[in-house]
Amino acid sequence: MLDIRQIPVLSDNYVYLIREPTSGAVAVVDPAVTDEILAEADKLGWRITHILNTHHHSDHIGGNEAIKAKTGCTIVGPAHDPDRIPGMDIQVKDGDTYVFGAESAHVFFVPGHTRGHIAYWFKDSDALFCGDTMFSIGCGRLFEGTPQQMWTSLSRLRALPPATRIYCAHEYTESNVRFAVSIDPGNATLRAYEAEVKAKRARKEPTVPSTLKLERAANPFLRADDANLQAAMAMTGQDPVAVFAEIRRRKDVF
Ligand code: ZN
Ligand code: FE
């Protein structure tokens, strides 16, 4: 099992340090920054061997070059976006398995937020690092992709085992829940989660990771084909892509 440490940085980003105990391999997932990550690794006595990038945005690659210069680590990132990942050594694409010590990451190409976005699924640890594709009760904005692309990407991630823990890159849950309740007020799982999220945030605790089981029941962006949500939105029987696009549109102006 991976040892996973979550480091809150900037205003609402999560950077992850993950260690595979058999080999001692240590990866930083989406290093937004440098100093805090190096300090945390030092404190743990972990030697950084890898960076895993999901996409090119600055709050995900900001530490790439300085961490590589300091540690000599190998940078792994999307082959789908070869020119926008600083210092990338190894390009991975949809369907690849990247061997990380005694574990391996299954790579999913999940365009929508950006045109090159990927996600890393560590099957043996039930852990998904999905960057800005899926958030707890939300999804990334469509900066470079279409609703069709994002719906396809989320549908593929939705098909992973329900026990999968969702290690997304931002703490956006509280505002996502406020929006979700506005369009899906009768969802009992969502309502129970709303109370849990409020209590956790009042204590300044993270709400991440969540689980895919919870997201499948309560995240509207994974439920564009759900009859109850479609009914609540007065869109019964419509194409899930059109429903998804409408959910995204409403969130953008919420
Ligand atoms: Zn992003
Ligand atoms: Fe981001």
Image (cartoon, grey):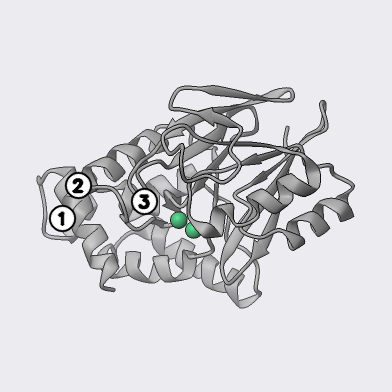
Q: Residues within 10 Å of mark 1 (few under 14, many from 20)?
A: few
Task: Look at the numbered discs 1 and 2 and tell me whether their residues touch, using CB distance below 8 Å.
Answer: yes
Residue that label 2 marks: 227
Residue 89 location, quadrant = top right
Q: Is residue 21 above or below residue 33?
A: above
- What residue sits 29% from the left and 66% below the top? 251
Q: Give residue 113's mark.
A: 3
Q: Position of residue 12 (x, y in %)?
A: 56, 67
Q: Amino acid at mark 1?
A: Ala
Residue 46 location, quadrant = top right
Q: Circle 2 — which element?
A: helix
- Would residue 87 be found to the left or right of residue 153 on screen? right
Q: Earlier in the sequence, mark 3 or mark 1?
A: 3
Using the numbered discs, state the Cα–Cα distance from disc 3 to disc 1 in whole angstroms: 27 Å
Q: Residues within 10 Å of mark 2 (few under 14, many from 20)?
A: some
Q: Quadrant of the N terminus?
A: top right
Q: Circle 3 — which element?
A: loop
Q: Circle 1 — which element?
A: helix
Q: In the image, is the residue at mark 3 within 8 Å of ligand 1 by its beta carbon?
A: yes
Q: Is residue 177 above or below residue 148?
A: below
Q: How many marks?
A: 3
Using the numbered discs, state the Cα–Cα distance from disc 1 to disc 2 in whole angstroms: 6 Å
Task: Look at the numbered discs 3 and 1 and tell me whether their residues touch, using CB distance below 8 Å.
Answer: no
Q: 100 or 157, which is in the foreground? A: 100
- Would residue 69 be found to the left or right of residue 79 on screen? right
Residue that label 1 marks: 231
